[in-house]
Amino acid sequence: MLAMADAMMDKNLLILDLDETLLYGTELRLDRDPDLIASGYFVYFRPGLANFIRHVAALYRLAVWTSASRAYAEWTR
């Protein structure tokens, strides 16, 4: 287990912004079904998000940042 932790620390940290980068939320429905509906907002994952996360996770330690409230950030987890 320690070897894996050491390997992770060798990677640079990539911090991704949750809103408007990884997700897009709007009060108006787009031309496709939303991935989530939260507090009256239709929430859409950015196209290619899953592949992007898989790719960068192999190269970096990842963290997600948001300027929104803690409750919102935990809800979208």
Image: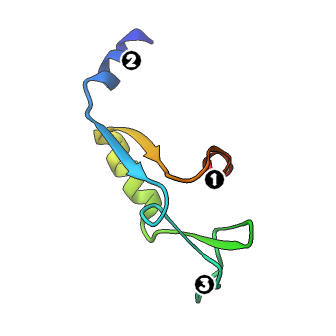
Q: Which mark is residue 32?
A: 3
What is the quadrant of residue 39 in the picture? bottom right
Query: Could you tell me which secondary element the residue under label 1 belongs to?
Result: loop
Q: Position of residue 26 (x, y in %)?
A: 60, 77
Please identify the quadrant where the N terminus is shown. top left
What is the quadrant of residue 41 in the picture? bottom right
Direction from residue 40 to residue 59 in the image, left or right: left
Dot placed on the residue nearer the N-terminal end, 2 or 1 = 2
Direction from residue 21 to residue 56 in the image, left or right: left
What crowding class fits label 3: few (fewer than 14 Cα within 10 Å), some (14-19), or many (20 or more)?
A: few
* Relative height, residue 51 to residue 5 (above, below): below
Amino acid, disc 3: Arg
Query: Residue drawn 28% across and 40% down?
Result: 59
Q: Position of residue 18 (x, y in %)?
A: 48, 55
- Of residues 27 and 35, the one nearer the viewer is 27
Q: Position of residue 5 (x, y in %)?
A: 39, 17
* Relative height, residue 42 to residue 58 (above, below): below
Amino acid, disc 1: Thr
